Amino acid sequence: MPRFSHEDNRMREQAEGISSATARGKLPQALTRLALLGLAFLLPVVSWQAMAAAAALAVLFSLFILPRVAEDSAARPSLSLRNGTSAYALSVLLLILLYHQDSRVIAAVWAMMAVGGGLGAAADKLRRGAKLPWNRQKTWMGFAGFAMAGTLGGWLLAAWVATPAVPLGGLFAVTAAAALLGAVMESLPVRLDRSFPVALFCGGFMNCALLFNPWAWAGNLPLLRVRIFLAVGIALTFALAARALRQVDRYGALAGFGLAVAIYLGFGYKSFLVLLSFFVLGSAATRFGYAQKAARGIAEARAGARSWREALANTSAAAFFALVSLLTLHQAAFLAAFVASLAEAAGDTVSSEIGKWLSPQAYLVSTFRAVPAGENGGVSAPGSLAGLAACAAIVALGAALGMCGKASAGLALTGAIAGNLLDSLLGATLERQGLITNGVVNFAGTSFAGGLALAAALHLGL
């Protein structure tokens, strides 16, 4: 048996001391999170404004008081809104502000972040079981732990705050689906606190899913029994053609097939034509000047063939809006969101590819500092004009196909432009710092574009 030197013992004692200090530092953070979750039980009797004020106070507490409680510097939380208890409290605040119209959404997602996130993190620390293919730091055990604990905790708390009482079976199904989405958000390969995507995207998902109307579903069901066969046949042809033309790789074709089926189901050949137009515009923009872009080292990898990651990032939000349009009485609003989402994806792809082709430099949207073309968050005049034209073309097609009227088309175009601006801002800040990936940026942009158009359309009663 090897013998430890005095230096080895000293280093081991230091490591144990740091570990102990870190554990002591995590105790007040855990207590803060539990205290915040306890506030959720007051949702039925306290106004959302008061709850938002309490969450804001929690943000200030975690920033300025909690670091003083953790006396050891090794255990002291950093003064940052990107990670830790501060980020968690800020996520709760955003959840309340965005979804205050439905306390069930706030309660369920709040419990998912606290209970599901806690159990998932504990399971991941065991380092047992297979790793997730998209994030080797996470395990399937942690993924399942978040989904199951988030479902149970979210459902119980949502049922507690629901006034008047609602059918618990439907609420459980919606909560389970949201918790599964939350497990995906929690497993993203990002350095930003994952409470943010869980709060924003799970909240948005539940807010939409709870608009389900059985009469709308019953009315569309006979049509879907026929449309499903067309959807599978056309989507399969689309995926095989894209693969043969080397516009997607193998897994990109598989993902594209599933997404195309969902989109075709939403509004038949009309919604599929909007998807096809986005695909053609993006592929053509990628091919324009490809040799020049390749020579400068800024061309898309794999000769421009998209993977499953790009497919999901750019079109999964549109597929969701298309499917939900079948399940509610707000079809016009969801179709506007669908068009806005694909218009944003087209604008982002075209602006990036045309900008890299025609402009040697770009400017960061956050600081307006000049950077080489192709840099994350960089915008150029040729690229921006081309992107705006692509957004307008997709929206005009949607309007021509009868998917949105004049007002809805205006909302869709506004949402698409806003989504492009958010995409550039996230790219110039969080992505450049390595906190999030390009896929996350693209998904956020398309989701924001559709969500903004949807919220405006619902508010206006369209």
Image (tube, helix red, strand yellow):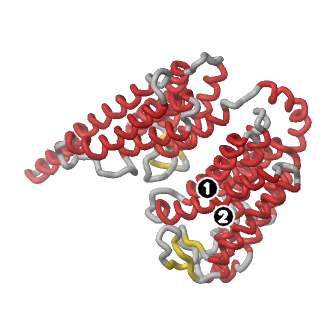
Q: Position of residue 180 (x, y in %)?
A: 58, 35
For residue 307, side relative to residue 58 (left or right) = right
- In the image, residue 348 above or below residue 173: below
Residue 174, quarter of the rendered image: top right
Label 2, residues with CA under 10 Å away: few <14, some 14-19, many ≥20: many
Residue 244, quarter of the rendered image: bottom right
The amino acid type, in three-letter code, at marker 1 is Gly
Under circle 1, the secondary element is helix
Let me know if residue 242 appears in the view.
Answer: no
Identify the residue under disc 1: 445
Residue 300, quarter of the rendered image: bottom right
The amino acid type, in three-letter code, at marker 2 is Asp
Q: Residue visible at 63% across and 81% down?
A: 359
Identify the residue under disc 2: 348
Q: Residue visible at 71% across and 72% down?
A: 386
Q: Position of residue 426 (x, y in %)?
A: 52, 60
49, 328: nearer the viewer: 49
77, 419: nearer the viewer: 419
For residue 452, side relative to residue 104 (left or right) = right
